Image (cartoon, rainbow, N blue to C red):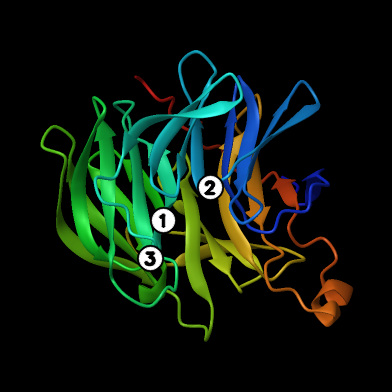
Amino acid sequence: MSKQLTIVSDVVNILGEGPCWSKYGFAWVDILGKKICHVQEGQLDEFHLEQMPSSLAFDEDGGLVFTLNDGFYKFEGRDPKPLCLLDRPHEDMRFNDGKIDGQGRYWSGTMDMKEENPLGSLYVMDDSSLIKVLDDITVSNGLCWDGSTFYYVDSPTKQVKKFYYDSDALALIEEDVLFAVTEEDVFPDGMCIDDEGHLWLALWNGFKVLRIHSVSGEILEQIDLPCKKVTSCCFGGNNRDELYITTASYEMSPKDWEKYPDSGKIFMCRPGVTGPLLNLFQS
């Protein structure tokens, strides 16, 4: 199968993240651009916001739900309406990556915006209340599930961790390191899982997405991109055989733009395997 990259959108994101493909269209966030982009039937709609959107999902009716700096929101018309907010939001922290689990609950974690201190936590929004499931997080990032296994990234640790996941108790136990990034100044970012149970991990400053064996942690293959800052990925397409990849143009120098002029754009390739579509939020 071809792994040739196609540019999905010419929108140049400062910090493209949170790709989400569904029957309701394709959407992503530009965190630092403070906007949500939604493409449906070839038409691009942009929602400009006062806070930074960091993750998103579709609900069962095709509406968008998303995280901003201080909590979880949905649109009422074109305005963000709070669903659940942090009790005491910290000005130096914000929400970051997030996804919906198999029960329709929204998971997202917070991060220290200086990316230095373990001030953040991982939360689940369940019945309009926030449940904390992990603490001492610096930059909460990629997450996905495979049955009773939960995979998670706290970027500065440079590790992908796996946990036993008790969905009824909302408990993460038996922590183990599956994979560690060894390249200097390269960090694990967003990720997704394929139908064979293996992970696809975007590498910030790494120019690529890695496919990682979910048991051994072995690198099975990689997709090289023409941009340095690769941020996240998700499966999509009518046959679920397309991998959509977000990138960033954050802190690009003039020389960087000469070398990597497609930075910040959204890419798609067919990696040769299929993957599940992201879950829909259930309110």
Percent position (x, y) of residue 38?
Answer: 67, 31
Percent position (x, y) of residue 217?
Answer: 38, 65
Residue shown at 41%/40% (left/top)? 99
Mark 1 highlights which residue?
Answer: 94
Q: Residue furthest right?
A: 258
Percent position (x, y) of residue 184?
Answer: 52, 86
Q: Nearer the viewer, residue 215 or 107?
A: 107
Q: Nearer the viewer, mark 1 or mark 2?
A: 2
Q: Tell me whether the residue at label 1 lies in contact with that at label 2, contact meaning CB atoms closer than 8 angstroms.
A: yes
Q: Tell me whether the residue at label 3 lies in contact with that at label 1, contact meaning CB atoms closer than 8 angstroms.
A: no
Q: Nearer the viewer, residue 236 or 132?
A: 132
Amino acid type at mark 2:
Gln
Amino acid type at mark 1:
Arg
Q: Quadrant of the C terminus?
A: top left
Mark 3 highlights which residue?
Answer: 217
Could you say whether the residue bearing mark 1 is in a helix, strand or loop?
strand
Residue shown at 74%/74% (left/top)? 252
Mark 3 vs mark 1, CA separation in Å = 30 Å
Can you tell which quarter of the image residue 204 is in? bottom right
Can you tell which quarter of the image residue 120 is in? bottom left
Disc number for residue 51: 2
Q: Nearer the viewer, residue 229 or 272?
A: 229
Ranked by sequence position, the earlier of labels 3 and 1 is: 1
Q: Tell me whether the residue at label 2 lies in contact with that at label 3, contact meaning CB atoms closer than 8 angstroms.
A: no
Amino acid type at mark 3:
Gly
Q: Quadrant of the N terminus?
A: top right
Q: Is residue 20 visible?
A: yes
Percent position (x, y) of residue 191?
Answer: 48, 53
Ranked by sequence position, the earlier of labels 2 and 3 is: 2
Q: Residue furthest bottom?
A: 184
Could you say whether the residue bearing mark 3 is in a helix, strand or loop?
loop
